[in-house]
Image (cartoon, grey):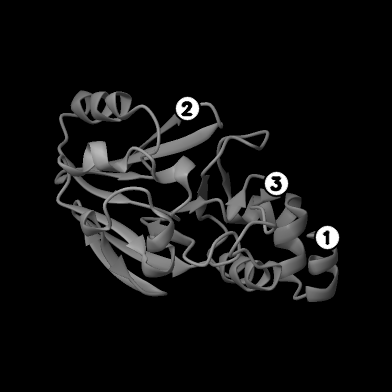
Amino acid sequence: MKIIQLKLGPMANFSYLACGPEGCLIVDPSWEPEKLRAAAAAEGAAIKALLLTHGHFDHSRKIAELAADAAEAYVEESDLPMLEADRRLFTTFRGDCSLSAAGFEIRVIHTPGHSPGSVCYLAEGNLFTGDTLFVDEVGRVDLPGSSPEAMYSSLLKIAQLPPETIIHPGHAYGSQNSATVGAQLLSNPYLKLAAARNKADFLAAMR
């Protein structure tokens, strides 16, 4: 899997292309679709699937422009109502599951907290975390549908992944563009509290 990270749009968003012999998938195609198409073309890869980590507009607003290029567009069913695009474009799933897209076997980890349908996608040791987890930060939990308690449980799931797992966040909010789970267990205060099962201090830190 070759991963191409593109920082696009006015909100420091990351979109990702994950490319292999059967084509590429795009995670969170929200801004500047022409640059996403150009990146796929530079790899000689067809766009086979679009994956949303959640339904907020800054992660999904341009998905309709790319949907004609891809065989499938995926979103967790809880976030379908917040999408601006035609909902008929999407294949939905519920909770933790597995997907096959662009030749990759993908583990879907349901990580509500930032939004009810937030998920992380795990493939070949790479974890696309959207707005659940950033480098040394965590997603907001003061939005409609957010939940600090759900975020705590979601981060506990991530903390239990192999330490060499590479985190690819949804925004350029940290000092680095990516990091490993192991490194974040040392430097990310929210992930450390979740890993220690210190729920009271975690909830206090999220206020």
Q: Which residue is mark 2?
A: 9
Q: Secondary structure at mark 1?
A: helix
Q: Secondary structure at mark 3?
A: loop
Nearest to N terminus: mark 3 or mark 1: 3
Q: Is residue 198 visible?
A: no
Q: Nearer the viewer, mark 1 or mark 2?
A: 2
Q: Which residue is mark 3?
A: 136
Please identify the quadrant where the C terminus is shown: bottom right
Nearest to N terminus: mark 1 or mark 2: 2
Residue at 21% from the left image edge and 44% from the top image edge: 67
Nearest to N terminus: mark 2 or mark 3: 2
Give the Cα separation between the discs numbered 2 and 3: 22 Å
Q: Nearer the viewer, mark 2 or mark 3?
A: 2
Q: How many other residues sit within 10 Å of disc 2, few (<14), some (14-19) or many (≥20)?
A: few
Residue 202 is situated, as x and y percent measured from the top left of the image, at 79, 66
Residue 108: quadrant of the picture: bottom left
Residue 155 is situated, as x and y percent measured from the top left of the image, at 62, 65
Residue at 17% from the left image edge and 35% from the top image edge: 45
Tell me the amino acid under the disc marked 3. Asp
Q: Is residue 198 above or below residue 179?
A: below
Q: How many other residues sit within 10 Å of disc 1, few (<14), some (14-19) or many (≥20)?
A: few
Question: Is residue 117 rendered to the left or right of residue 173?
Answer: left
Q: How many other residues sit within 10 Å of disc 3, few (<14), some (14-19) or many (≥20)?
A: some
Residue 148 is situated, as x and y percent measured from the top left of the image, at 70, 67
Residue 191 is situated, as x and y percent measured from the top left of the image, at 70, 60
Tell me the amino acid under the disc marked 1. Ala
Q: Which residue is mark 1?
A: 205
